[in-house]
């Protein structure tokens, strides 16, 4: 087995999935985020890199497992992936929170909260902005469902990019845009994204030698390495792959759910316990589901 090819395929797959997620995020950020030029857009995108990376790592592990699928002795490849994965995950999760773009003078110029003549959702209101000129928005039409006077029109307002609020000059009202379109997201995708964010925050190192984060990341990568066993669970490879793909997300959902029950001491090392236990189970399963070249 070519170990170099395995590592190269793993790194290339991680980069590909990471790049794909960044591309898919572009239209979402355009529709949700106030636009302050390239600096503002790029800064928001960077804050999502941790979650994108965790998702990419899961996908790249499965892709390399498929590459090793017909190898009768995949243990060496799994061992190399384990160590390479630990170093990569720890190094990048440690680096992402410190990535910041330098603030440039153009940020003090005009900002627009949305493309002119479009409708967006924020603070339980549908808001239409006609034009954006020199930081002043207007006219502004606000539709608030289930109110006695649901439609209101204002000639102008000002967007505050730091507070992410729209200030209506005529009434003095500040409309927070932080929850923009969040209520309109599909439940499953919204829940999945929330679980990914929670999990990423849980395992991200807080300093260069964060022993707890090291434990969480080691068990996380160990669990992903053990998913190779599931590819031989049944005779149907597609079904096996879907099961293997579902396991990491189910683990993350379980961690988020149990964390919601309360922060008690026994739950502090919950990620390590769940991931480590899952890895031991699947590595044990691999002893009985030996890879075979006969299909």
Image (cartoon, rainbow, N blue to C red):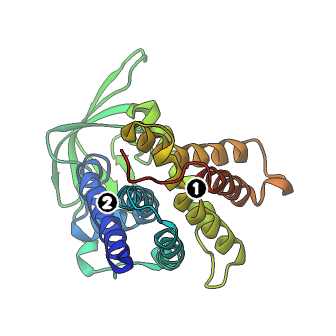
What's the residue at 39%, 20% (across, down)?
Answer: 145
**Pointer 1 or 2: first along the chain:** 2
Q: Nearer the viewer, mark 1 or mark 2?
A: 2
Foreground residue, 235 or 117? 235
User: In what quadrant of the picture does the N terminus appear?
Assistant: bottom left
Residue 154 position (above or below residue 40): above
| Residue 123 visible at all | no
Q: Are marks 1 and 2 in contact (CB under 8 Å)?
A: no
The furthest residue to the right? 265
State the image quarter where residue 154 is shown: top left
- Point out residue 291 in the picture as x, y percentages from the top left corner: 47, 54
Residue behind mark 1: 199
In-image side of 69 versus 39 (left or right): right
In the image, is 135 to the left or to the right of 58?
Answer: left
Residue 210 in the image: state x and y as whole percent: 67, 79
- The numbered dot on residue 39 is none
Residue wearing tag 2: 17
């Amino acid at each position: 087995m070519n170990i170099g090819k395995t590592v190269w395929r793993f790194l290339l797959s991680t980069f590909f999935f990471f790049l794909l997620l960044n591309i898919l995020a572009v239209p979402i950020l355009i529709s949700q985020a106030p636009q302050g030029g390239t600096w503002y857009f790029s800064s928001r995108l960077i804050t999502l890199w941790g979650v994108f990376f965790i998702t990419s790592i899961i996908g790249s592990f499965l892709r390399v497992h498929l590459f090793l699928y017909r190898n009768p002795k995949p243990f060496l490849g799994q061992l190399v992936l384990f160590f390479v994965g630990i170093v990569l995950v720890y190094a990048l999760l440690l680096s992402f929170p410190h990535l910041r773009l330098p603030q440039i003078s153009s940020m003090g110029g005009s900002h627009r909260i949305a493309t002119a003549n479009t409708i967006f959702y924020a603070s339980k209101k549908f808001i239409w902005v006609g034009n954006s000129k020199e930081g002043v928005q207007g006219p502004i039409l606000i539709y608030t469902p289930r109110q006695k006077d649901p439609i209101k029109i204002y000639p102008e307002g000002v967007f505050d990019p730091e507070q992410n609020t729209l200030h209506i000059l005529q009434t003095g009202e500040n409309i927070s845009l932080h929850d923009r379109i969040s209520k309109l997201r599909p439940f499953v995708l919204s829940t999945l994204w929330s679980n990914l964010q929670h999990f990423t925050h849980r395992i991200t190192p807080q300093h260069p030698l964060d022993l707890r984060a090291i434990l969480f990341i080691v068990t996380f990568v160990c669990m992903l390495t053990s998913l190779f066993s599931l590819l031989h669970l049944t005779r149907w490879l597609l079904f096996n792959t879907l099961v293997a793909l579902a396991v990491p997300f189910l683990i993350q959902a379980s961690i988020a759910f149990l964390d919601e029950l309360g922060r008690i001491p026994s739950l502090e090392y919950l990620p390590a316990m769940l991931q480590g236990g899952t890895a031991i189970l699947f590595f044990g399963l691999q002893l009985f589901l030996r890879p075979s070249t006969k299909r």
